[in-house]
Image (cartoon, helix red, strand yellow):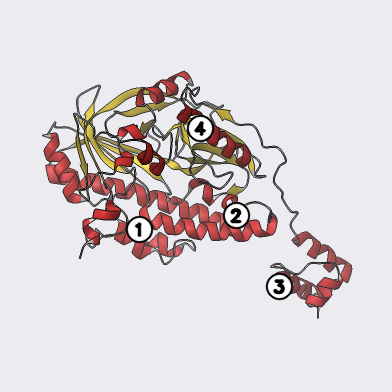
């Protein structure tokens, strides 16, 4: 019998592969294989260690030339993270959008507005916990009183972290897929309890009128909620297990799952489940609003901006807060994408440009020049004038006011000058609802 001592004597180092190596070796010996044949087979089981590149691959940048110190600090931080990120051995190409801003302290954390294309690798850290953060729009036939419509939006859904007692019930086909997938099994309760709810932070419901026609339009912005956050944790655990074997020197936040593996195929399917959950959640909220106001929907579409896509070249394109802008990016691509800017600025409606240098992406919004805490330390932002703004918990989240973001006009101009997308219409703001500063005053936290 071939045991661990035999493998050590043959020059193999003890580790996670020892058990499957012993199983393979003893099965081959039982079949009559020679020691030389067994040794060769075991050698093939030991992965060639992948290491970080000494120099990172180049990446394209579609950012404004910094003029203020805040802009310079933001750009320098983004470039520093991208330079480190592009040393990861799975990455083939990268790009930075106009709304780019740092998204973490660990060196080489993909920034918001960052895009990377990887070969045979899905990096959960590159899409983060907010899987399939996305925007959806419904255009109504009749121009109802917008205040009444926004009242109905506030009545039919909840904003903020966590699920609610008023869960709507998860669609049966989705529930079955969740149970059947190894990465989502056991999360059906979370998926059900969070269904019909909105997020916190920069997630919102936005009501306005189309610039082109004056039609009333509802736009919602959120991801896969607690369901996606739990999926992300499981994905990161699998990625770290794999990367600890094939590339132990790669930082854990840059870990990946081999796409062409059982885990990779299961995780890819889990991402599609989270995508379908999020789409269903957007449209369930829209449908409740439609029923409440008794108005007909004449147009409806959506797009994600925090996800992983695969193109015909076989690479996996990770957009961290970046809007896909190429035809056929998804099975339900409408040819149009939504790019929100801030609560008081229009939501842009754009057609695809497929800019190869930008890897086919456009910005997902306006982006921040600094973190939330730094902004609140340095500024006393004013509440917006001229719109019906609401915070669900009753207390404004000052870190989400328009002053916290890059200038909306600047982002729109950069989309045009870098040829990232063609803006063909806008949703002019009437008002919006956000969760607000729920940590102190959330009504669901009060007994």
For label 2, the crowd category at 10 Å Cα-Cα, with few meaning under 14, some 14 to 19 and many 20 or more, is some
What is the C-alpha distance between the residues marked 1 and 2? 35 Å
Q: Gap between marks 3 and 4, in whole Å?
A: 50 Å
Q: What residue sits 32% from the left and 49% below the top?
A: 199
For label 1, the crowd category at 10 Å Cα-Cα, with few meaning under 14, some 14 to 19 and many 20 or more, is: few
Q: Nearer the viewer, residue 14 or 384?
A: 384
Q: Nearer the viewer, mark 1 or mark 3?
A: 3
Q: Which of the 4 image quadrants contains residue 336?
A: top left
Q: Mark 1 and 2 residues: CB-CB less than 8 Å, in contact?
A: no
Earlier residue among tags 4 and 2: 4
What residue is pinned by disc 4?
A: 73
Which mark identifies residue 252?
Answer: 2
Above or below, 26 relative to 287? below
Q: Residue at coordinates 56% horizontally, 48% vertically from top-left?
A: 106
- Which quadrant holds the C terminus? bottom left
Location of residue 276 in the rendering, given as x and y in whole percent from the top left corner: 38, 50
Question: Which of pointers 4 and 2 indicates the residue nearer the eye?
Answer: 4
Q: Is residue 261 above or below residue 219?
A: below
| For marks 1 and 3 on the same chain, the one whose residue lies earlier in the sequence | 3
Residue named by callout 1: 173
Between disc 4 and disc 1, the foreground one is 4
Tell me, for residue 19, which label it has, or none: 3
Sequence-wise, the earlier of marks 1 and 2 is 1
Q: Secondary structure at mark 2?
A: helix
Q: How many marks?
A: 4
Residue toward you, 241 or 281: 241
Q: Which element is circle 1 on?
A: helix
Report how far apart the C-alphas of labels 1 and 3 lie in the structure: 38 Å
Q: Can see residue 237?
A: yes
Residue 253 % position (x, y)? 57, 52
């Amino acid at each position: 019998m071939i045991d661990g001592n035999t493998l050590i004597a043959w020059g193999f180092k003890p580790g996670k592969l020892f058990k499957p190596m012993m199983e393979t070796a003893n099965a081959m010996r039982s079949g009559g294989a020679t020691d030389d044949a067994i040794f060769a087979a075991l050698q093939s089981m030991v992965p060639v260690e992948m290491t970080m590149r000494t120099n990172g691959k180049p990446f394209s940048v579609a950012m404004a030339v910094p003029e203020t110190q805040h802009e310079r600090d933001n750009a320098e931080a983004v470039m520093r993270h991208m330079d480190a990120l592009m040393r990861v051995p799975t990455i083939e190409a990268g790009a930075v959008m106009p709304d780019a801003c740092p998204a973490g302290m660990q060196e080489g954390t993909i920034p918001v507005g960052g895009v990377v294309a990887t070969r045979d690798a899905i990096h959960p850290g590159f899409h983060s916990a907010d899987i399939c953060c996305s925007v959806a729009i419904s255009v109504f036939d009749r121009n109802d009183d917008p205040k009444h419509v926004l009242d109905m939006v506030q009545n039919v859904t909840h904003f903020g972290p966590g699920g609610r007692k008023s869960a709507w019930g998860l669609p049966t086909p989705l529930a079955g897929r969740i149970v059947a997938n190894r990465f989502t099994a056991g999360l059906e309760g979370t998926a059900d309890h969070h269904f019909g709810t909105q997020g916190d932070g920069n997630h919102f419901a936005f009501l306005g009128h189309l610039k082109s026609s004056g039609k009333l339009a509802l736009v919602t912005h959120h991801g896969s909620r607690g369901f996606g956050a739990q999926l992300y944790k499981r994905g990161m655990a699998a990625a770290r297990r794999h990367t600890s074997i094939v590339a132990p020197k790669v930082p854990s936040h840059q870990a990946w799952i081999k796409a062409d593996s059982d885990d990779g195929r299961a995780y890819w399917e889990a991402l599609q489940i989270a995508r379908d959950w999020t789409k269903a959640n957007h449209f369930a909220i829209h449908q409740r609003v439609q029923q409440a106001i008794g108005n007909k929907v004449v147009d409806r579409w959506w797009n994600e901006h925090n996800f992983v896509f695969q193109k015909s070249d076989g690479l996996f394109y990770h957009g961290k807060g970046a809007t896909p802008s190429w035809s056929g990016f998804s099975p339900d691509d409408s040819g149009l994408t939504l790019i929100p800017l801030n609560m008081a600025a229009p939501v842009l409606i754009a057609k695809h440009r497929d800019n190869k240098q930008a890897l086919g992406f456009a910005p997902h919004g306006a982006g921040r020049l600094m973190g939330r805490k730094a902004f609140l330390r340095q500024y006393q932002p004013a509440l917006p004038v001229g719109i019906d703004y609401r915070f669900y918990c009753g207390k404004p989240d000052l870190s989400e006011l328009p002053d916290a973001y890059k200038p909306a006009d600047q982002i729109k101009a950069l989309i045009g000058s870098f040829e990232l997308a063609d803006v063909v219409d806008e949703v002019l703001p009437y008002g919006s609802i956000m969760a607000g500063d729920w940590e102190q005053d959330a009504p669901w936290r009060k007994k």
